[in-house]
Amino acid sequence: MQLREKLRHFGVIPVITLTQVEDAIPVAQALSDGGLPVAEITFRTPAAAEAIAAVKQALPHMIIGAGTILTLAQLHQARVAGADFMVSPGFDATLIEKSLRMEMPFIPGCATATEIGAAQTLGIDLVKFFPAAAQNAQAVIPAMAGPFPDITYMLTGGIGFGELNAYLSLPNVICCGGSWIAPTVLIDAGNFTEIQENAAATVETITR
Ligand code: 3PG
């Protein structure tokens, strides 16, 4: 199955930010046990690269993205760590071109028609629309289908259980991402049981 089909199949990508590498495997295990064997581990902390490598080694069935990729150095670290895909909050042509040359799936953040058009020109057909709630994704994403019929979206930013199905019902939306399943406060507290319950509740919520 192609990455895009896997992400569509999961419907939701837990976005996790780890304070310490030691939490990576228990969090990933909790997500997998809850029915979501997928995560985006963000480069917002120095633990990210080591955490990705640890999860890919211990739980190779999991699909692990590297998030908040802002520099070429992070792109390289994430690739070496074994990430399956990269996500960036914004549009950066240098990062996109480099990842395409590496044959590494890259999901750039695009919030405007200008950015979506520029990503399409570079050969991208799956973009991250961020922050989805604050930018009224439910109105904007259907409107983008007119000029950009071949572009699909990962929505993140301000999404929770409540709005999930409304977002997932938009035809050009592949998946939603968010931190509500495994927020850092639960990770730091070692509350992996609640993370597993959140994952299971999310899977249960999805009606698509
Ligand atoms: C992301 O990087 O995708 C977002 O920070 C996730 O957004 P959320 O924390 O509002 O769910």
Image (cartoon, rainbow, N blue to C red):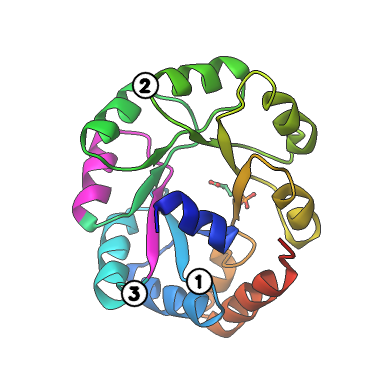
Q: Amino acid at mark 2?
A: Ala
Location of residue 162 in the rendering, given as x and y in whole percent from the top left corner: 81, 59
Q: Nearer the viewer, residue 129 or 121?
A: 121
Q: Nearer the viewer, residue 2 or 183?
A: 2
Q: Which residues are magenta?
A: 62-80
How many marks do you count on the picture? 3
Residue to which mark 1 is pinned: 188
Q: Amino acid at mark 3?
A: Glu
Asked if the stretch drawn in magenta spans residue 77, the answer is: yes
Residue to which mark 3 is pinned: 22
| Residue 157 in view in this figure | yes
Location of residue 86 in the rendering, given as x and y in whole percent from the top left corner: 37, 45
Q: Is residue 66 left or right of residue 58?
A: right
Q: Nearer the viewer, residue 10 or 18?
A: 10
Q: CA distance from mark 1 to mark 3?
A: 10 Å
Q: Earlier in the sequence, mark 1 or mark 2?
A: 2
Q: Within the image, what quadrant is residue 183 found in?
A: bottom right
- Whether residues under marks 1 and 2 lie with C-beta atoms below 8 angstroms apart, the answer is no
Q: CA distance from mark 1 to mark 2?
A: 35 Å
- Label 3: few (<14), some or many (≥20) within 10 Å? few
Q: Quadrant of the N terminus?
A: bottom left
- State the SS at label 1: helix
Q: Amino acid at mark 1?
A: Asp
Q: Residue at x 72, y 57 (%)?
A: 160
